[in-house]
Image (tube, rainbow, N blue to C red):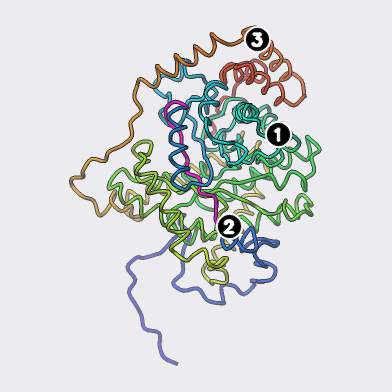
Amino acid sequence: MLEKKKTTERLQSFTTLSSKPIERLYTPEHLKDFNPKKDLGEAGEFPFTRGAYPNMYRGRLWTMRQFAGFGTAADTNQRFHYLLSQGQTGLSTAFHFPTLMGVDSDNPRARGEVGVCGVAIDSLKDMEILFKGIPLEKISTSMTINTPAPILLSMYLEVAAQQGADQKKLNGTVQNDVLKDFIAQKTWIYPPAPAMRLCTDLFEYCMTDVPKWHPTSISGYHIREAGSTAAQELAFTLRDGIEYVDYCVKKRGMKVDEFGPKLSFFFNAHNDFFEEIAKYRAARRLWARTMKERFGATNPEAMRIKFHTQTAGCSLTAQQPMNNVVRTTIQALAGVLGGTQSLHTNSLDETLALPTEESVRIALRTQQIIAHESGVTNTVDPFGGSYFVETLTNEMEKEAEAYFRKIDEMGGMVRAIELGYPQREIIEASYRFQKQVETKEKIIVGMNDFTVDKESPLEILKVSPEVEQKQIQFTREVRARRNQKAVAAALTDLKETAKGTKNLIPAIRIAAREYATLGEMIDSMKEVFGVYRDPGHY
């Protein structure tokens, strides 16, 4: 036998982005207990490891859904029409921070934030302008909104009704994931119990009244952006999903085989190419097994996870921003090879400002080139059977299951959040990665290595300060023109409904129809629900 030649390696150790050790070579020995029939199966069949559908992109490409929103509703409507003209196949709406927090644009708390990080939506009148000229019965719309999701969807449904659309044919998603807000995004309003009530009210309403709509997009994206590892993103996202299913089954008596198919998920696509692919494959398998074994689902559609993917905003650098095109391409490719159903690619300038038309077009073209020129859509799950990828998938699943057990022992995700557990786990992971960047254990090209002394300034989109005054004036005019008695009656009814146990969505729709503002509706429910205070465990 020939003696193995010793070789010098350039690093003392090799790890994933999440600091998991990577071996030099993966062989059949790493998959001794691997059962292809049990752990892989066929694409489109339990446990869905190889893909949600049998033909995947040979049958239909993913939905290309660029996140868009800035300034007034009219500004964003113009961007929507531009993106659709460039080949985008679905809409994705970014709301400004005041809307996320349930605050109207003329509230002092909104000062300096109006239209800056998304579109300003204060009333039904804004929603009418936002979707002007867009046939809602024919387009799939995603709205990234959480606690105020029932209000925004109610406004959307009212616009659809004005268009004469059949709401039973409307297709789209609201994020409506408040648990993620408590864990990572921090845009909470109400305490967990009433927040969960609002979530499940919307689940219940959509099942009967808007059956094609996905009433939640359970989001790991913000968990990863807050600094989690890939496995933490997977674990906390799916465990949030378990919590929602628990609430629907135990508190509402809903049937998992009926509402399970309407759940959707939202994952991050970070820089570690193989780790991300393994994460998506593990997500499909783990969710399928969870729905079948934990909840007794028998409907394959209730076990089939469907998810949107967005490339990692936290990976983008202000330094040498053109490098972000390469990062986004790698991340998008991982999302496609991991089998996503929908994809947003970040623009090169998004770490500096809202994207310009040119940069958002490049981001969309990135998806189109992957779809039509790369060849990766020609076969399903091309990395299936790879010793490395299958090992990573198995390890990712096991780590997520360990988190499940810890959270179950605490009494569920709501209790774990109250104890600050997932928040602390994410903070520790984020701190560890930051130290690795500072010591150059992890290289960020153009930021902590391969830097340049002088860079040419990048032309960026700037939201004029005049937008704020324009939106404030518009909102006040809407208030002045509406039927004040009808608004007051609708808000009173909303508050009274909040005191009981009836589904809140019909009362919210009436208030929206009368042009009650977002902030007025949120405040009416605050009088009953109160507001959430961070427990300060971390």
> What's the amino acid at mark 2?
Arg
Q: Residue at x 62, y 9 (%)?
A: 483
On the image, the x and y values in percent for residue 150 come to 64, 29
Quadrant housing residue 145: top right
Nearest to the eye among marks 2 and 1: give it: 2
Identify the residue at the far bottom of this view: 1
Q: Residues within 10 Å of mark 3 (few under 14, many from 20)?
A: some
Q: Which mark is residue 488?
A: 3
Q: Is residue 511 above or below residue 183?
A: above
Residue bounds of the magenta highlight = 60-73
Question: Left or right of 129: which side holds 524?
Answer: right
Q: Which residue is mark 2?
A: 60
The mark that comes first in sequence, 2 or 1, is 2
The residues tagged by marks 2 and 3 sit, at their Cα atoms, a distance apart of 48 Å
Q: Determine if the magenta segment contains residue 408.
A: no
Q: Which mark is residue 200?
A: 1
